[in-house]
């Protein structure tokens, strides 16, 4: 399913919440080509090729989702294509599909083509479970699962099925082996993202003394908010406004309440974790009230529409905002980034510069390495694919994302590195996504030292 993403007409108004493959030649072939094939080609195939194929197939264990005779490996994607995060997940899936197409064109997994079974969950937990049950008997793994509560909801079924899943969520709870037994999370958790970004801000502004914190309720918002509080304590910042879990992105009244709390706090640093539309609403109200502060929050809040020529926050956001990305931004000067940009542009020439396409490439490349490792071990069963993932000692994305290991204790393998970025209209006008790299491969002292004896925010305990 090739998804053309021409959905990116984003209008930002102050305080507005974002809604979201004959005839005459046949006789010649029969008369001329068939005798040659019968006399010359058939004996060679029987004597040389068939034994090799039989031997190769006999060496590879399979159960569900792998058809050696057909030459296919079927992988499921449970994706939010129409729900609240669809504007982000649609390009992730497009990037995923682009990378899988490239993998198959290059020979697939030892000659086996990867087939994607893409299902829309609408960001509904019930639909996520329903879609999993519909595909669980036809896929070898889940190459993508949108959402923390959604992924947790199928946790027991994943374990029962020996099914690997790659989650599209950066919840710190994945550091808990009991919670992530069948998962291969990648990227920096929300709470470590907070520690990194706030640590960087203070390193550049040592006179900053106060911070305002606000977030959505749940694993995403509160994991991030808890990380901000941990950073504040470590850095000696006074929390002058605590709006953790107070944001309801669909309720303008809560946006006004949070904006007023931030306005009245006089904070030097503002940390807000919510959707792009809700963030722009809160930020816009604070600007109108004359608030001057360093603003940040989880990268999920960013949208390049903030830099549009008609955006009322275009200039201010370049002055005030600084945040972190778990992967390199679109314009990053790394081999992995350059290759991913070229891939996306060839697959969909109309695709805008947007980091979420790159996230899809990151996920698909991780899947490729895992499937190759499973094949090399002779075990393409679901349990074999899961074991290959669990024994992946090193994964490099050539600068597209930080290198990562998946073997060891949780505190040893959790990703702690981010890329610090700022909004840049110049980058957008030059064909980028509107993000300029401030510092690549950054890890604050707080994030480096933090030990996960438990998740930052226990959403599912």
Image (cartoon, rainbow, N blue to C red):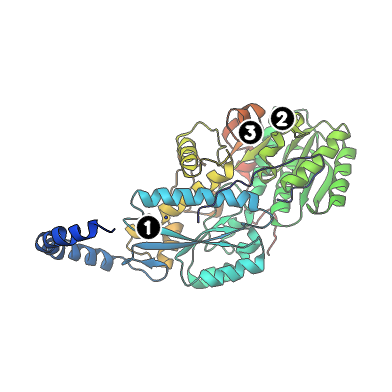
- Mark earlier in primary sequence (3, 1): 1
Of the residues tagged 3 and 2, which is closer to the observer?
A: 3
Question: Residue 197 at x, y = what percent?
Answer: 67, 38
Q: Work out how far the residue at label 3 is from the one at label 2, CA to CA, in angstroms.
A: 10 Å
Above or below for 370 versus 317? below
Q: Is residue 251 left or right of residue 195?
A: right
Of the residues tagged 1 and 2, which is closer to the observer?
A: 1
Question: Residue 161 at x, y = what percent?
Answer: 49, 71
- Give the quarter of the image for residue 331: top right
Q: Decide if residue 363 is in sight here.
A: no
Q: Which mark is residue 113?
A: 1
Would you say the residues marked 3 and 2 are in contact, meaning their CB atoms lie under 8 Å apart?
no
**Quarter of the picture holding the C terminus:** bottom right
Above or below for 161 versus 77? below
- Mark earlier in primary sequence (1, 2): 1
Q: Secondary structure at mark 2?
A: helix
Specify the farthest residue to the left. Answer: 39
Residue wearing tag 3: 434
Q: How many marks?
A: 3
Question: Residue 253 at x, y = what percent?
Answer: 87, 51
Residue wearing tag 2: 318
Q: Secondary structure at mark 1?
A: strand
Question: Residue 3 at x, y = what percent?
Answer: 54, 52
């Amino acid at each position: 399913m090739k998804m053309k993403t021409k959905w990116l007409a984003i209008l930002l108004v102050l305080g507005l919440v974002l809604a979201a493959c004959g005839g005459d030649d046949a006789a010649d072939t029969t008369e001329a080509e068939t005798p040659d094939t019968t006399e010359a080609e058939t004996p060679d195939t029987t004597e040389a090729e068939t034994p090799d194929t039989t031997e190769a197939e006999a060496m590879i264990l399979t159960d569900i989702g792998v058809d050696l005779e057909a030459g296919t490996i079927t992988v499921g994607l449970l994706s939010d294509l129409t729900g609240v995060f669809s504007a982000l997940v649609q390009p992730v899936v497009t990037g995923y599909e682009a990378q899988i197409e490239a993998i198959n064109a290059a020979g697939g997994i030892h000659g086996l083509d990867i087939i994607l079974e893409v299902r829309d969950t609408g960001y509904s937990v019930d639909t996520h479970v329903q879609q999993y049950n519909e595909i669980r008997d036809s896929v070898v793994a889940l190459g993508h699962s949108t959402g923390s509560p959604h992924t947790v909801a199928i946790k027991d079924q994943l374990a029962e099925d020996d099914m690997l899943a790659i989650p599209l969520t950066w919840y710190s709870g994945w550091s808990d082996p009991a919670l992530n037994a069948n998962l291969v999370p990648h990227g920096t958790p929300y709470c470590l993202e907070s520690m990194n970004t706030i640590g960087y801000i203070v390193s550049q502004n040592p006179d900053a003394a106060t911070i305002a914190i606000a977030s959505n309720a749940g694993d995403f918002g509160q994991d991030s908010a808890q990380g901000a509080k941990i950073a504040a304590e470590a850095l000696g910042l006074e929390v002058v406004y605590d709006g953790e879990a107070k944001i309801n992105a669909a309720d303008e009244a809560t946006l006004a309440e949070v904006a007023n709390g931030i306005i009245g706090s006089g904070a030097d640093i503002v940390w807000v974790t919510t959707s792009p539309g809700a963030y722009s609403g809160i930020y816009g109200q604070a600007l109108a009230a004359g608030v001057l502060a360093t603003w940040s929050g989880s990268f999920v809040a960013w949208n390049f529409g903030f830099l549009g020529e008609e955006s009322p926050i275009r200039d201010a956001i370049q002055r005030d905002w600084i945040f972190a990305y778990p992967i390199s931004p679109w314009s990053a000067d790394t081999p992995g980034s350059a290759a991913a940009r070229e891939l996306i542009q060839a697959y969909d020439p109309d695709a805008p510069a947007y980091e979420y396409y790159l996230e899809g490439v990151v996920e698909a490349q991780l899947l490729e390495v895992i499937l190759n490792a499973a094949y090399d071990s002779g075990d393409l069963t679901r349990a074999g694919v899961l074991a290959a993932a669990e024994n992946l000692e090193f994964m490099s994305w050539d600068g597209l994302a930080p290198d990562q290991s998946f073997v060891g204790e949780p505190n040893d393998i959790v990703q702690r590195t981010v890329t610090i970025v700022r909004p840049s209209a110049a980058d957008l006008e030059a064909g980028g996504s509107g993000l300029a790299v401030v510092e690549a491969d950054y890890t604050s002292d707080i994030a480096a030292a933090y030990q996960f004896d438990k998740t930052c925010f226990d959403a599912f305990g």
